[in-house]
Amino acid sequence: MIFHHTAKFKDIKHTFHSEVNFPHGRERDIEANKELIIKGCKNQLINDCKRWGCEPSEMVFYEVYWVKRFFDSKGDGIEAREMEVFRWEK
């Protein structure tokens, strides 16, 4: 299961995005493993900050979410929604 995380930093207009894959994760397991998911995403954030050239101390916004897809009776995707796991704003 893929979890997305986005971050904004002081004096930078661009929003940064990355993904963390929990290969055995399932929707039904999210609530019971919420802290583990957040920890895994924050660990990835540390690496991403280095790659992005940003300092974690300059972060003003951070969120973790997953995308829930909805299907019609034929199995065709009709909608997708971002489902929040964690949100922080300075």
Image (cartoon, rainbow, N blue to C red):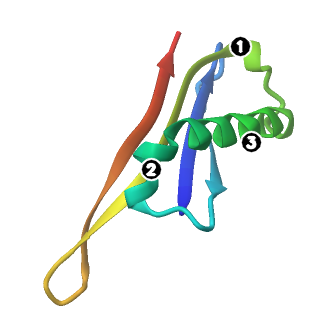
- Location of residue 88 in the rendering, given as x and y in whole percent from the top left corner: 50, 20
Residue shown at the point (79%, 32%) measured from the top left: 46
Q: Which mark is residue 30?
A: 2
Q: Few, some or many C-alpha atoms within 10 Å of disc 1 (few <14, some 14-19, many ≥20)?
A: few
Q: Is residue 27 left or right of residue 60?
A: left
Extreme bottom residue here?
74
Is 13 located above or below residue 66 in the figure?
above
Task: Say which of marks 3 and 2 sits in front.
Answer: 2
Residue 15 in sight: no
The amino acid on which the numbered mark 2 sits, given as a three-letter code, is Ile
| Secondary element at tag 1 | helix
Determine which quarter of the picture holds residue 16: top right
Task: Say which of marks 1 and 3 sits in front.
Answer: 3
| Secondary element at tag 3 | helix
Residue annotated with mark 3: 44
Residue annotated with mark 1: 58
As rendered, which of 78 and 15 lies closer to the eye?
78
